[in-house]
Image (cartoon, rainbow, N blue to C red):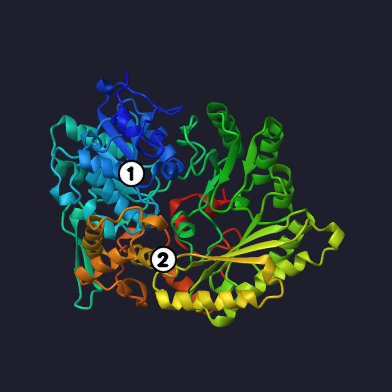
Amino acid sequence: MRKLALSDEILLTVEKPARYIGNEYNMVVKDLDKIDIRFCMCFPDVYEIGMSHQGIQILYDMFNRREDTYCERVYSPWVDLDKIMREQQIPLFSLESQEPVKQFDFLGITLQYEMCYTNILQVLDLSQIPIYAKERTEEDPIVIGGGPCAYNPEPLADFFDMFYIGEGETVYDQLLDIYKENKQTNGTRKDFLEKAASIEGIYIPSFYEAAYYDNGILESFEPINPHAPKVIKKQVEMNLSDTFYPEKPLVPYIKITQDRVVLEILRGCLRGCRFCQAGMIYRPIRERTLTFLKERANRMLKATGHEEISLSSLSSSDHTELSELVYYLIEEFGTKGVNISLPSLRIDAFALDVMSKVQDVKKSSLTFAPEAGSQRLRDVINKGLSEEDILKGAMDAFKSGWNRVKLYFMLGLPTENMDDIEGIAVLSDKIAREYYTIPKDQRNGRVSIVSSTSFFVPKPFTPFQWVRMATSEEFLDKQRFLSGKMKEQINYRSIKYNWHEVELTMLEGVLARGDRKLSSVLYDVYKKGCIYDAWSEHFKYEKWIEAFEENQIDPLFYTSRERAQDELLPWDFIDAGVSRQFLWKEYQNAISEKVTPNCRQACAGCGASGFGGGVCYEGKN
């Protein structure tokens, strides 16, 4: 019988003990005596967040299809169990076998959000694995990171043995095969790392050395091991309809953030928004076929019993067979009590027709993401959305019965002025005014407009990777100004204004474009007790400021400083498929307020065609 790592006494004292017992429906069970490679997959956040991440579900399924490999899972223990594990010296354990993570061959950590970085150190520490890679021995697991934040791995470089740059379906099998061979021939840890360095997309931080000018700017970044390539090339799975995707996703015992079947319909985005890292690093856009999507939807719903299916992508409306898929799902499952969720849709006639069929119009709200309040600034960021589009979409929705609209904007975008900020309030009011042009007897009650602003953070591999980020004081001034302008609008009683925390945004900005010097800050702030920084009730900003001061590092160096065109950036050794020349050209287009057509309208020469497929080759023989 499977023995739990935690006693009943401990489980009864912590919040939601189901986070730690495993044995969920569709969990994979293997005979450990027949396994050559043990891989523990980690999402460094609480169980409910980690279990909602589709990337781990895909890799979990992919690894466990190998007869020689057993992939298990671990998540960050919540603060109550964290305290108990430290006091009682209980090593962190996997959910499947309930065995210590330190006994595994690999610990794979998903890097999804910068503000989870201290939780990575928590996982290593509780696992009793040395936090710094240089201190690990032959007995310790290989710690590997992947995900969107791996496109600038440098703030974490000292803590990881390797990073996987790109999509996991491509070279993981090759990496595991090399590990198995190295193990069988009694090769050392260093032998394996040197062999792994020859695999495209694998980055070994210890094989590189960074040098800095006196002013702190990166002077050089060079390989110091003959096996290490000068450039690491992103890995891309080009055939999404002939690769790994779970048929039997894990089903949790407790409610999680995304408690539904998730069907990824495409990868990439052709819109080219200049602030959006995902839209750049996941190029080119690639679709899964209608046949694949129908078949996988049926299998996953049958295997899980879920009553909702979500079509996942960066821009669902750009799938060329979306209407056929959606109407199939409505016809096939609509009468069986299955809800269909359609995020990332442009609001048009098709979207409204579909949503009226799959949502309770009276209870649901529609979401628009104009990002900027003025047309000028939307052109700067290449949003590809006019005010006419927004007002027409809202009006069509109102006529179809909706009376609740959510609007998402950013403050602090490049070239932003006070007129652009006031435009957020004006646009919110214009949408409310549209509603009140409908005769009173045809309205569905009072209109509700919820306008939310986040603060702009420049990210690597975007046209804005060179720009200065606003300071905390500047952000707060913008926020106060907008709050005042909201109250001046005719329909202000129908408009609710929400905003994000500025301190969290500033740290995200530091870590997003940081370098190796930040590892000491991360280590020190973790030792000061910082974990779950993304959770406001556990966020200790003053501890971060202390750590910066103690390490003589000015966070404004990483945020509020414009980079020169020729400055060597910490992530320049990665080839993400979009060229530096293209990104700089797009930055100049932004300053000139020049719009770049989307990928189906015209090729902008970003470099993604080099992968040999996707939207770049549509209609070509």
The answer to the question of whether label 1 and label 2 lie on touching residues, with beta carbons closer than 8 A, is no
The residue pinned by badge 2 equals: 505
Which residue of the protein is positioned furthest toward the top in this rendering? 1
Q: Along the horizontal axis of the image, is 426 left or right of 536?
A: right
CA distance separating discs 1 and 2: 26 Å
The residue located at (48%, 41%) in the rendering is: 256
Q: Mark 1 or mark 2: name the one nearer the start of the chain.
A: 1
Is residue 388 something that shows in the picture?
no
Where's residue 375, x and y in %?
Answer: 62, 74
Which quarter of the figure has residue 232?
Answer: bottom left
Where does the image place residue 243, in percent across and percent down from the top left?
46, 36
User: Which residue was labeled with disc 1?
Assistant: 80
Residue 3 position, x and y percent, is 30, 23
Identity of the residue furthest to the bottom in this view: 418
* Secondary structure of the residue carrying numbered label 1: helix
For image coordinates 54% across by 31% down, the residue present is 300
Neighbour tally class for label 1: few under 14, some 14-19, many 20 plus, Cα within 10 Å: few
Is 168 or 56 nearer to us in this picture?
56
Question: Judging from the image, what secondary structure is the residue with disc 2 in?
Answer: helix
Where is residue 403 shown, x and y percent of the image?
A: 73, 57
Dividing the image into 4 quarters, which one contains the N terminus? top left
